[in-house]
Image (cartoon, coloured by chain):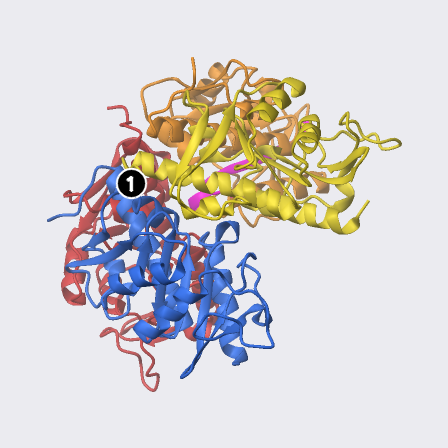
Chain colours: A yellow, B orange, C red, D blue
């Protein structure tokens, strides 16, 4: 298990916690260690994500169970992480309970649309503010295979993140830092949309 | 008196202060030391809760008075803590002046209703976002026996916290960390409800 | 000049800066050193208030000029501090640019009214949340004698602070810590009022 | 290359990042090193601006290319910085993605107008709150020469900053600290305007 990757993962988890994305021991992060067969290092269940040490991460397989002899409990949402690794080919996944993205997801729509905002470029592969980025919103479920199905079906190449209604956001990337940046980007855009909406402002057509 | 518990209590008070819940020297925390007869360690009155040391906590009995020879003044709301220990069987109590929970409590209702929010699971014993959690709101009083009566009467098993109108929130738990998490959870849910309300959004029916 | 008072003053200035009250090098703080004749230690002009050292404070007289041989420039608003010492008999004065108090002051009224909020008790001498506290709002002026006249005329015993419209808040107290707490209290109450107002909530009559 | 200037620049970048202006690796800062021919030290592309060290800054010429043998990549917006140095005679430029300024820029207007706010005095050269300060809003562009044209055409002496619609703010000054303070001032004023607008308050006529 790469010590450097785990140091990066704990640092990024701490950074995301500092942004307020991991309140009440919520949120989780993982990094891919091996692709075939799938092995990832996953944050543990029910602890504060601001102070994780490299040794706290749990090595899990494609079924999201800890690799023996490790018997510690990874995050309940580990299976969803594994499905995202399978579907997207990404290297890291970050999940947080983002205040504005969660609040805006409580409407009836199935996407959050950002239009003409420079910060859209913080999504890897987006090179201009022109046009729009549609961040999918899917229904929440306590069944991880079902939730994974919703997330995988709704994902798209242009936005490496999916909002789960009333829950939070899953974001992924080609590196730990990129996955974390994508999570941060969704909340930045959601906050901007909320600030506009509450002020009665809409972007120029 | 357990040094370890008091270290945990000062750390949690500092964490809650860092979240902005203990502004203007408000807020207080305690931990149960003995159940029969009731003895708790209580934060002192009128000081900043962000820098408390283990030695700052005051050992008090069921009448909320310091155990002799200690003559220091515990928080004015110590008696309410003791009544919560008696009524709920909890191990720790945290009280904070939570901005969004306090603002929303200024309406005429007697509860704050969160529906379909994943973070409801941060209340111990809640295992799904499906359905709702009703956080009671009771009237404020400067008479601690009266206020305790309101809180005890309104408490419920599903939500280990009560909002006092225009005042703040009392939360409890099976450990210091759980009591603090419950306090944080109320404000997280209240902020989400406020963000939704101000944006004209209501959760799907 | 008391080293202890100046250490407390720099610590309190740093605390208030950490709360976001001293943005853009705004805000200032002082402590009374002698009452007859009036001598105070005043923060310097045009510097960041988050990192002040005790030696940075400037000893000034009743005319707000530095006492020779010191020729450093105290805050432009030093004269207003001295008038507050004369009128109120207080021991310390804190001034900050408080976001919500400033925004709410841009209406046409001459006071901000907080009613039924427990945090009103953070004003020294207020012992209950019952009833209201009226925080005066006065017009701004670049003429310090004129501004001092407005502040002194509007002050009242129940609220040791005055809001200057579109500018910020002056608060005072019997100690450095109390003056800083009063400043923090005004912003806490103003934020609560703003959160209520924007959510369409008014306190129960 | 002056070590002291680069230390100041990294400190100011860290301060601005701490204010939340440099989210998602956005934002950039520079300082002028030589005026004839134009040489500036520029922050690197695509990194977090909160932890920059003096050696991270890249020496660039008037064409915004790194001076050989340095081949590192400066910020994409380096050319805009150089055009601002040419047009304004300033010594430093700071750019950030300011939440409230960006949200308010999404209306149809071409300026943000602050009226009667004391904090207007944080713009160098403004000595009174009386009257108004009009902060220009220009359209965004991924073509740096075009964007520079917009910014230079809209700039004015009274406000050393320009808002780029849906993007963020460029501010400049006679020193690193002044440029950073001007950036902070725009967001402070924008937040105040947003808080007023959302509360249904307008400044007295």
Q: Is residue C200 above or below residue B150?
A: below
Residue B165 in view (yes/no): yes
Looking at the image, which residue sits at the far left? D205
Q: Is residue D205 left or right of residue B40?
A: left
Quadrant position of residue C192: top left
Q: Is residue B32 above or below residue B24?
A: above
Q: Is residue B14 left or right of residue C56?
A: right
Residue C130 drawn at (x, y percent): 30, 30
Q: Is residue A112 left or right of residue C157?
A: right
Q: Is residue C202 above or below residue D90?
A: above
Pointer 1 indicates a residue of which chain? Answer: A
In the image, which residues are magenta? B19-34
Residue C24 in view (yes/no): no
Quadrant position of residue D175: bottom left
Name the one closer to the observer, A191 or B39: A191
Kindly identify the residue that appears in the image at 50 percent across and 33 percent down.
B95
Name the one closer to the observer, D77 or C122: D77
Q: To which residue does mark 1 refer?
A: A204
Q: Is residue C201 above or below residue A4?
A: above
Kindly identify the residue that appears in the image at 51 percent across and 47 percent down.
A122
Name the one closer to the observer, C118 or D60: D60
Residue D182 drawn at (x, y percent): 34, 63
């Amino acid at each position: 298990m790469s010590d450097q990757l785990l140091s990066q993962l704990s640092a990024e988890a701490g950074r995301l916690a500092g942004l307020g994305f991991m309140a009440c021991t919520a949120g989780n992060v993982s990094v891919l260690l091996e692709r075939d067969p799938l092995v990832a290092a996953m944050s543990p269940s029910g602890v504060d994500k601001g102070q994780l040490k490299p040794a706290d991460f749990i090595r899990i397989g494609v079924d999201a169970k800890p690799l023996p002899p490790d018997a510690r409990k990874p995050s309940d949402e580990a299976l969803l992480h594994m499905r995202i690794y399978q579907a997207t080919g990404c290297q890291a996944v970050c999940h947080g309970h983002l205040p504005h993205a969660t609040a805006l997801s409580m409407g009836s729509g199935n996407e959050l649309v950002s239009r003409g905002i420079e910060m859209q470029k913080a999504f890897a592969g987006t090179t201009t503010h022109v046009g729009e980025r549609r961040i999918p919103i899917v229904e929440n479920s306590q069944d991880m295979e079902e939730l994974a199905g919703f997330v995988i079906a709704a994902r798209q190449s242009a936005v490496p993140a999916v909002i789960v209604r009333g829950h939070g956001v899953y974001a992924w990337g080609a590196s730990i830092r990129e996955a974390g940046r994508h999570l941060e980007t969704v909340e930045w855009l959601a906050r901007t949309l909320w600030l506009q909406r509450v002020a009665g402002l809409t972007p120029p057509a």
